[in-house]
Image: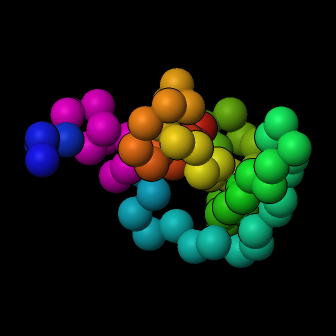
Amino acid sequence: MSAPTKIEREHYAKLVGRQITAILWEDLEGQALPVLLLDGGDRDGNAAMVTVLADPEGNGPGHLDHNL
């Protein structure tokens, strides 16, 4: 297993302390896509959400996409 990069560590550290308040389901090419609604807002003042993707490009191990 490779070590996480600095960017990966910083990306996921922004989730620490957040609480999931709801799970929304969106459609992604006919498949259910879970979107986790978090307490607080994102860096732009919108609702804080985390989307579960395969990876940032959509073709590898798990990745939680967020705008925190």
Q: Is residue 3 left or right of residue 46?
A: left
Left or right of 56 in this view: 25? right
Q: Main secondary structure of the magenta part?
A: helix
Q: Quadrant of residue 24?
A: bottom right
Is residue 45 placed above or below 15 in the rendered structure? above
Quadrant holding the C terminus: top right
As rendered, which of 31 and 10 lies closer to the eye? 31
Residue 7 visible to the viewer: yes
Q: Is residue 21 left or right of residue 29?
A: left
Tell me which corner region of the image, top left, top right, bottom left or bottom right, holds residue 15. bottom left
Q: Look at the image and say whether residue 8 sits in the magenta stretch.
A: yes
Using the rendered image of the protein, determine whether residue 68 is visible from the camera's viewpoint.
no
**Residue at 44% across, 69% down:** 17
Residue drawn at the location 87% of the way across and 44% of the way down: 30
Q: Write the residue at 12% across / 41% down.
A: 2
Check the image and report above or below for 11 versus 47. above
> At which x and y percent is residue 45?
72, 41
Segment tinted magenta in the rendering: 5-13
Question: What residue lies at 40% left-to-right and 63% top-to-bottom?
Answer: 16
Q: Residue furthest top?
A: 57
Q: List x then y, in percent, for residue 10.
A: 31, 41
| Residue 62: image location, x then y, percent | 45, 48
The mark total stands at 0
Closer to us: 45 or 47: 47
